[in-house]
Image (tube, coloured by chain):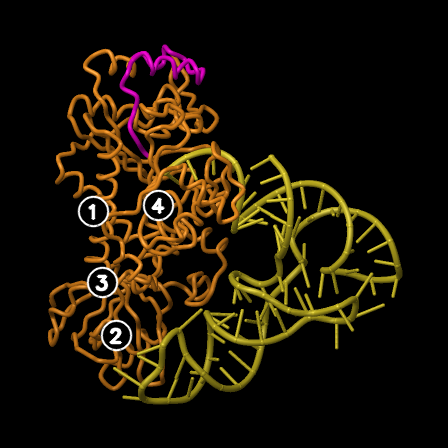
Chain colours: A orange, B yellow
Amino acid sequence: MHPRTTIAEAGRHAGETVQIAGWLYNLRKSGKIVFPILRDGTGLMQCVAVKSALPEALFETIKDLTQESSIVVTGKVRADQRAAGGYELDVEDIQVIQRVPESDPYPITPKEHGIEFLMDHRHLWLRSQRQHAILRVRHEAIRAVRDYFDSHGFTLVDTPIFTPAACEGTTTLFEVNYFEDAKAYLTQSGQLYNEATAMAFGKVYCFGPTFRAEKSKTRRHLTEFWMVEPEMAYADLEEVKRVAEEMVVFIVGRVLENRREELRVLERDVSKLEAVQAPFPRMTYDDAVKILQSKGSEIEWGGDFGGTDETLLSEDFDRPLMVDRYPTEIKAFYMQPDPGRPEVAMGVDVLAPEGYGEIIGGGQRIHDPELLLRRLEEHQLPKEAFDWYLDLRKYGTVPHGGFGMGIERCVAWLCGLEHVRETIAFPRMLYRLRP
RNA sequence: UCCUCAGUAGCUCAAUGGUAGAGCAUUCGGCUGUUAACCGAAGGGUUGUAGGUUCGAGUCCUACCUGAGGAGCCA
């Protein structure tokens, strides 16, 4: 029995005979020599099977292997300049676990396919090199997020998925008909609960799926997406901005450090990511509106930015842009107004460079009980549903704040993708529930 | 929800209102260093659905279905 290894580890076994279990990615034939490309989840490796060196029947079996057949290859690892990963495997034996029949071949060939076809075959598309690379960058980004908060005094306190009331608007909530005493909804943010846990733990974060029933149909939207939301007691807007900046720099650094190969597969211009260092440029909403108007945007003070506006603003910078103090009117009810200018709120958005738009939204929350109560009334929200939330202002209220970052938008930016749908294994969108 | 565009072979796409075609995939044959390998041959079609105009519709018209891009809204 030869030692079992993986393609990623194969280089350590140069000169040895090893076993690698995987799938046939592709096969090139040239008469008496064939080149099966093996895929094992850690990478791709070219194998070489020479007719004269193998039993007749085995060579025939290898020659007739079909794409994505499951195989266990035994062979000697050999360093080779010609190989993509630097190493090749000289085949000594191949055990076929399952041969994909040619009557029903693997549908995703190594050629071009349209997005509809690929999305319908998402369960298989994940095996392709590009999707593999994207999801590994996603994993790295998530690990970096967790490492960042875990090493900066934050406690992970996850918030519920079923919630009794809206955090923001009611129109974009998914209703769940199960609970006997009340209607329930799928969460659209863990923030309100985070505010409670922050008063218990000081600094907290939650990281989970979020659901928005927005009829959005753009490259930046998913119906179900993952959001990391830190919340900090005794923090003001400036502290929120500082943490957001530090976290983004940390994530980018980690991806550059550990996922170079994946970024290469994705043909990502890493110099764009290497430029992402503190300090990020900062501007107020007021200035952003002036800049947009000078660039020909039709935006007026008081309006929210469109996708094009975000691109216009961020195009002047090589790193994320922080815009703060938006009009109070267009922000959520819990946003702390600027003490000197109550018409603007202490909220901040972080716009990723290269036109990727908003990846982070956050700010300082209202800590004054009377003001919060007034805002609930202005927004015509049911006071009863927020009784526990109001308690947080009754019992030891403090200035506090936090933000939310959509992981898919962040990964789309890190990878340089056209669309967020490729950044999650099984995207859920307005017209996409399968597979 | 609204606007725009698109549905033709398993896939990616051609076809002036006049005989539905190519590349890839599949099958068969050839090739001892291929890199989305290459060379030769074969099979493969209710042109999204239902109507309509016309001597004749993949092509023009109407409705519907499916999808893509964008808008508003948002991370």
Marks 3 and 4 share the same chain: yes
For residue A133, what is the image quadrant?
bottom left
Residue that badge 4 annotates: A408
Q: Residue at x 25, y 26 (%)?
A: A194
Q: CA distance from mark 1 to mark 2?
A: 35 Å
Name the chain letter of the residue that bears numbered label 2. Answer: A
Q: Kindly state the secondary structure of the residue where label 2 is placed.
A: strand
Q: Position of residue A423 (x, y in %)?
A: 35, 49
| Sequence-first disc among 1 and 2 | 2
Above or below for A178 versus A217: above
- For the record, the magenta segment spans A362-387
Q: What type is the residue that disc 3 sits on?
A: Ala
Measured along the vertical axis of the image, is residue B25 above or below residue A321?
below
- Give the residue type at disc 1: Ala
The answer to whether tags 1 and 2 share a subunit is yes
Location of mark 2 (residue) = A47
Residue assigned mark 3: A21
Please identify the quadrant where the N terminus of chain A is shown.
bottom left
Above or below residue A166? Residue A384 is above
Camera-side residue of A337 and A130: A337
**Residue sitting at 34 percent across and 36 percent down?**
A324
Indicate which disc, 3 or 4, sits on the residue closer to the N terminus. Answer: 3
The residue at which mark 1 appears reads as: A144
Q: Identify which amino acid the numbered label 2 is placed on.
A: Cys
Task: Say whether marks 1 and 4 touch (CB < 8 Å).
Answer: no
Residue at disc 3, secondary structure: strand
Of label 1 and label 4, which has the lower sequence position? 1
